[in-house]
Amino acid sequence: MGSKWRKAKLALGLNLCLYVPKTLEESSSLSRRSNDAVSLSPVTVPRPTTPTPSSSGLRLPRSISISSSKKTCAICLTTMKAGQGHAIFTAECSHSFHFHCITTNVQHGNQICPVCRAKWNEVPLQIPNAKSKPIVRPRDDAWMTIPPRRSSQNQPSPRPERLRPVSMIFNNEPAVFNDDEALEPQHHNPAESTKPGGVSGKLEVKTYPEISEVVRSVSFKDFSVLINLKAPPVSSSSSSSRAPVDLVTVLDVSGSMAGTKLALLKRAMGFVIQNLGPFDRLSVISFSSTSRRSFPLRLMTETGKQEALQAVNSLVSNGGTNIAEGLTKGAKVLIDRRFKNSVSSIVLLSDGQDTYTMTSPTGSNTKGADYKTLLPKEVNRIPVHAFGFGADHDASLMHSIAENSGGTFSFIESETVIQDAFAQCIGGLLSVMVQELRVKIECVHPMLKIGSVKAGSYRFDSRTGSIEVGDLYAEEERNFLVNLDVPVVDGVLDSMSLLKVGCVYRDPVTKETVDLSNSGEVKILRPVLEQRPVVSVEVDRQKIRLRAAEAISEARVLAERGDLTGAVSVLETCRGVLSETVSGKAGDALCVSLCAELKETQERMASRQVYESSGRAYVLAGLSSHSWQRATARGDMSDTTTMSYQTQSMVDMVNLSQTMTFGCPRASSNANSSSNPNPSPSARRKLRQALTFPARPRAR
């Protein structure tokens, strides 16, 4: 009997991994298990006839006779061919099946390969149509299924199209990516649209002089004026009250991403897909030795989400790391598109070093190479939010890509927080309230001249006196320090006007231009004798923030030169200075957090090995956050320094991510007592406290 089974294997092309029963009883048992696994499959499974001796050794029915297992689904025994209307799933063990066949297997609890009996770490899932109930996977990845969405007049009407097969989406990559899905018209509430400044109100502009008065007979060099900007909040939770997003994710699927990394990346992408709205569009680019467009730019309707999840589930890790080609293709998706949403962004994730563009022909990494060569020219107009994953990624490269494109760099040290890091990023992208913001600064007094502007990575044009700020998320703040020299004044002047501040921006929801030309005028008193000058706490807080960021930047330069002792000394000195400031003595939350960040940075410069493995990435993620005044992920996202510049939209999205259930709960030291006690501890991720930073008192 064993001889006949071996001949059957050869006839079916399954001679490598097919399990061979030893006895007739075991053969019958295997047959019963196979029939049970596909009992709900829509494809009728033909029963093999009893083999009879022949010249070929074994005769098989014509309906299932094929030449190779790669062309046959081992469950339904029918052919698999692209373009026949059936999605194809390739497992970790390299065996392929019809997607609907294998998901039926998984639904019934079978998580082993029907061909070679290998146990799978990454299991496929089937998302039900809008009229059916979500299927809960055995591993409790609830957010990887898309629940039916209630109909609304502000949402696009359901289309009568059927789900496009994965093979059609993946394998036909055109030369020009102008096949993006057309945008759906958004319907805004007329009552909201009549509000001053747009749907959610105007940008808030505040100014603070360093001190309230300067004696007439005294000059003041480098007098600081703080300009504080705050974006309006989101008016409602409706997707029509915010700007829709075109998001392109460029994902590393090289060989080093195999196993748990890729599984967690897929889950994180499932979370992103679920939280995109019907007016948002998503495209997925995967890269290893080469790049491919795994999913075109599609609206995230119910159908779009199902197709996107199928694309993500089909990702397989292998090959090297070609970041440049992945970025180029990601930019091409946005450049070639026919339609454009108000907000566009690229999310890049990699866990390794670019082994193609940044490697010499001899195989050694090129030291001192210009990282800008990796950034396509077209990307300069598109922010790239880069995520360095693990200890082996090229932090300098990823930081350079983000910095030169206007995006942020985040360091994901622990693979279990990749979903939280993505959640924080999309929490911001899905709440853009201000676009193309430009701040104009003008000296009022003829004897005044702007000395310098502390604007971080934002460009200040001294000729026009303007700062190009760009986009702001809901309730996001920007702080700029303007330094000027206040001269001695003659005559009778009770007060002196220093600066006028104006702003112009575009409302991304209404597409209207909002002009705040006379946003504020900064004045100080000029008494004959010094009275009681009021020192601005707001200015003091921003000065210590800049001082801490400059110390971290200086320490990084020393660390890269190999002088870790000098780097630690710079950080220790800065901590001492901060503790003696007005804010430090008052126990200000910002100062406390900055001191904690300086201490953490010191610890990550304790040795060359520690700095190379995590210190460099931690420092660069912090500098990216401070220079753009925007939240980034650092380390395991468990300390307060990670919460710098977080907006409420980011906090809400991270909290949503942390309360999601899945099969591999992450341990946490700060469990939130308000979490639901009903689920078992092993089935729920513990919720850490996430606070908006810097902490500000809320009105009661």
Image: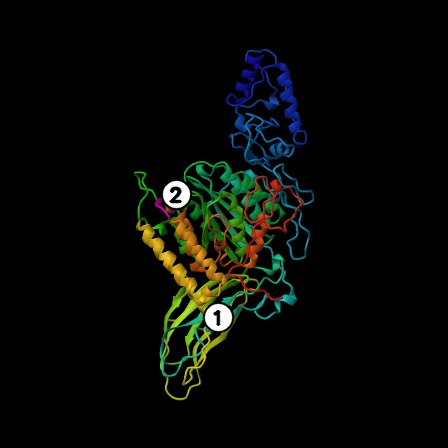
Q: Earlier in the sequence, mark 2 or mark 1?
A: 2
Reply above or below: 353 against 381.
above
- Give the percent coordinates (x, y) of residue 131: 69, 44
| Quarter of the rendering occupied by the C terminus | bottom right
The amino acid pointed to by label 1 is Cys
User: Cβ–Cβ below 8 Å for labels 2 and 1?
Assistant: no
Reply above or below: 538 against 251.
below
> Which one is in front in this view, the residue at disc 2 or the one at disc 1?
2
Residue placed under numbered mark 1 in the picture: 503
Residue closer to the observer: 140 or 221? 221
Res 130 quadrant in image: top right
Specify whether residue 344 is in view: yes
Distance from disc 2 to disc 1, alpha carbons, whole Å, reads 41 Å
Reply above or below: 510 against 448.
above
The amino acid pointed to by label 2 is Gln
Specify whether residue 46 is in view: no
Residue placed under numbered mark 2 in the picture: 353
- Element at label 1: strand
Residue closer to the observer: 659 or 256? 659
Q: Is residue 50 left or right of residue 426?
A: right
The magenta stretch spans residue 303: no
- Give the percent coordinates (x, y) of residue 499: 43, 76
Q: Which residues are magenta?
A: 606-610
Residue at 65% over, 63% down: 189
